[in-house]
Amino acid sequence: MFMGDRVVQVDRRQKKVTSEVAFRAERGFGPASMPDFLALTGDRADGIPGLAGFGKKSAGMLLGAYERLERIPANPFHWKVKPRGAPQLAATLMERRDDAFLYRKLATLVDTVPLEGSLEDLRFPGVPRVRFERWCDELGVQRLKTAPKRWQ
């Protein structure tokens, strides 16, 4: 796996760019393991429940050592790392392994969808102002009129 200054995350709201090195330093595992991390810890925003008992520290520690769910040994006494509650975590992972694989699949960005046209064709042109403002008037939600940041 390539390591270095490759950008792995751009946060436009916070105006922050995260490199692979910074990602690893902050989380304890590489960016390719993020879907596995979300499978273990869950992701409320995307409706992924995760597995009971797994938190950021334990999941980060295990994925830092093993990278992928299927590489984590079933027996916690064979683990290279010793997160708190390792025997219970191993039991949960063993019992809910299929769920974890499903959660990982749900958390994995699919980037192989064939697209017609160019990226420019997909760019959001903005909210149609007249139609949107009329809709806000019909619903009686005047404050919503100021929400869009880009207008057509």
Image: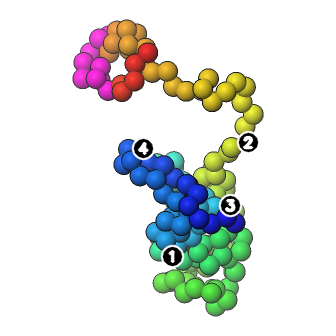
User: How far apart are labels 3 and 4 at the CA level?
Assistant: 30 Å
Horizontal and vertical percent position of residue 9? 51, 52
Disc on res. 58: 1
Which segment did they paint magenta? 137-147
Helix, strand or loop at disc 3?
helix
User: How far apart are labels 3 and 2 at the CA level?
Assistant: 20 Å
Residue drawn at 55 percent across, 84 percent down: 86
User: How far apart are labels 2 and 4 at the CA level?
Assistant: 24 Å
Q: Residue 147, located in which quarter of the rendered image?
A: top left
Residue type at mark 4 is Arg
From the image, tell me which residue sits under label 2. Answer: 112
Helix, strand or loop at disc 4?
loop
> Farthest residue in the front direction?
5
130 horizontally vs 119: left or right:
left
From the image, tell me which residue sits under label 3. Answer: 101
Tell me which label, 4 or 1, sits earlier in the chain: 4
